[in-house]
Image: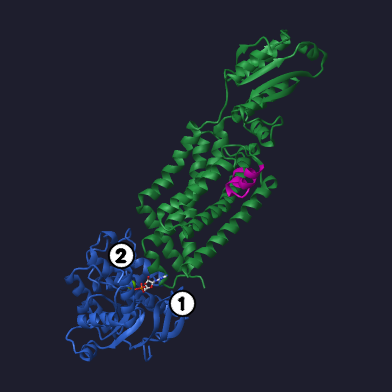
Chain colours: A blue, B green
Amino acid sequence: MVMEHAIEVQGLTKTFGDFTAVDNLSFRIKPGEIFGFLGPNGSGKSTTIRMLCGILSPSGGQGKVLGYDLKDSEKIKQNIGYMSQKFSLYEDLTVEENIDFYAGIYGLRGKEVRERKEELIQLALLTGKEKALAGTLSGGWKQRLALACALVHRPHLLFLDEPTAGVDPVSRRVFWELLYRVAAQGVTILVTTHYMDEAEKCDVVGFIYQGKLMGFGTPGELMGAMGLTNLEDVFIKVVEEDYQDEAWQELLKSHRKEVTGE
Amino acid sequence: MIKWFRIRSIVVKEIIQIKRDIPSLAIIFIMPVFMLLLFGYAVTTDVDHITTVVWDQDKSPQSREIIQAFEQSGYFDIRYYAGDMKEITWLIDGGEAKAGFIIPPGYARDVLKGQSAGLQAIIDGSDPLIARTALSTAQMIGQVKGFALKLESLSRFGLGIKAEPGIDLRARVWYNPDMESVRFNVPGLIGLIMQNITVMLTAFALVKERERGTMEQLIITPIKPFELIIGKLIPYVGIGFMDVIVTLLIGSLWFEVPVNGSVLLLLALSLVFLLVALGLGLFISTVAKTQLQAMQMTFMIILPSVLLSGFMFPREAMPLPVQAFGAVIPLTYFLEILRGIILKGIGLQELWRNVLWLAILGVGILTLSAVRFKKKLD
Ligand SMILES: Nc1ncnc2c1ncn2[C@@H]1O[C@H](COP(=O)(O)OP(=O)(O)OP(=O)(O)O)[C@@H](O)[C@H]1O
Ligand SMILES: [Mg+2]
């Protein structure tokens, strides 16, 4: 696939009523990159991902995913993989049945299904659990199964929304090993996370806060710009800097006045 | 473009899930049997041995003959012989007797002369079921014995009954000569069971997908809402149909209510009704957020359909606004169809109106729900 950017958005905006969840977002991701999308809770990460997947229409701005316009959601859907924030596979289906199901949905057939399933079970380290119900798997295994299902149709772009939330450190490391392997095959990955050690493993990271993009660059660039030695401090500064904002201070003052009468 | 492989994947997945879900299996296999037993045995609307008082003013062989005819019908137990009107009123007021017959003086003379002999019946209208049975039986006996029945309903007991029986009532007596409620219930049960199971399971299947978050993963795939709906509905058409056959078999083999009309027509029209029920389930799934809500809403649909469709009580006896409400319940029409085919053995020629209404309601509900469902996904 020949294209300059796997993702490119300009002025992407989403409003719910008079609340702006995503505010004028612009960035570009090169094919094959791992992009870490960071931001506190409610900052608009999932909403952005939903727009990029074509299941939520933007209120403003434009963008291209894998060279397809955001409006062309059919084409996009066929070529992306997605892992939602919450485990969302069928717990009453076995590991194999889950993979079979998504293989069927994406139009894989017969031998193709069997071969791909074997490949994925090996890749996602699920060997031995093929017949286990997904609901009986532990956190780390569930995430790997979800990854396998998201990869079943060999997507060129993978959206992972907090894939490692609530997973132990060892399982997280294993999961990231897998991500590197997938990226090495040329798959672009957009991953959101609240773990800064994971963010440091990304090629590029973007900070989003209250729907706005507050920073973008390689982890090294961002740490350098702020003169800090780890991303965690960068994250905190990005968010806390905003607390010094005049408007914020006004609000605090008026609140204090209301409560204490001063 | 609809892709059949996607629909097939959904169907396969759905069947695996149903197989592993104990509550669903219970609904599919136990509910029909349970409902058949409940309505076949426990909830009997049969009325017989109505305690009766007679005031024989004629005291002739002819009057004794007519009293015997009442007694022998099995519906009336002549417990009391009254000497005057006061006594009859007293017995019925006190609930001792539910029906009273007054044979006027000169009854034998009229009968012998070949004239229509008048006979007065007083029926306690407080239990409409008893009242109807008493009335229609008395009328039947009257028709046989050739006397005119003058009816006086004790309307102070609440529900008065109409002097003229509704068409349905007569049909009931004709086609169900023993007035066994099993005969009346079994055809209705086929419709009710089918409706309940399909509505409930379809609603659950779709709400579950949303409740557990699997819908989120699904809508990111290229599957179209229409394919999802079709794929989800196919297994439940199968299950609904299977339940029709099971109920029919139990009905005809165990309760001995055979299908008098065309079985093929019955199955074909069941399919139409199934689509209606699936539409209702789909509709619930667009409103309910959790399986519990879906369950509650299912009952909100089931209850009026049990009470107002004519399943338990004849619609003719209902006030007009209630009848009108019953007219928008799909089960109402399907019941007519079921009873028509199973009990009367009639066909499309007589039933086409019901079929038409059922189809109209079905297309309406299914379209509305599908549109709502699609909107919710977008
Ligand atoms: N459908 C919606 N209607 C109204 N508000 C919404 C809707 N979806 C999201 N929001 C709001 O938009 C904001 C951004 O939500 P979003 O889920 O994108 O955040 P997030 O960055 O993914 O947060 P988290 O880290 O908690 O997952 C939140 O304040 C949320 O309440
Ligand atoms: Mg989120």
Location of ligand 2 given as a quarter of the image:
bottom left
Q: Residue at 38% x, 75% y: name it.
A: A47
Residue B38: where, in percent of width, then height? 47, 35
Kindly identify which residue carries mark 2: A96
Q: Assess whether residue B212 is covered by the magenta stretch.
A: no
The crowd level at tag 2 (other Cα within 10 Å; few <14, some 14-19, many 20+) is many
Q: Is residue B182 above or below residue B299?
A: above
Is residue A152 visible from the viewing direction of this image? no
User: Residue A153, percent across and down?
Assistant: 36, 75
Label 2 chain ID: A
**To which quarter of the image does residue B188 belong?**
top right
The verdict on residue B333 being magenta is yes
Q: Are marks 1 and 2 in contact (CB under 8 Å)?
A: no
Q: Which mark is residue A43?
A: none
Tell which circle, 1 or 2, labels the residue nearer the N-terminal end: 1
- Secondary structure at numbered mark 1: loop
Q: What type is the residue that disc 2 sits on?
A: Glu
Element marked by disc 2 = helix
- Residue A201 appears in which quarter of the rendering? bottom left
Q: Is residue B33 above or below residue B161?
A: below
Q: How many marks?
A: 2
The image shows residue B362, relative to residue B99, as above or below, that is below
Callouts 1 and 2 in the same chain:
yes
**Residue assigned mark 1:** A57
- Residue B19 on image: x %, y %: 37, 53
What amino acid is found at the position of numbered circle 1 in the picture? Answer: Ser
Q: Chain of mark 1?
A: A
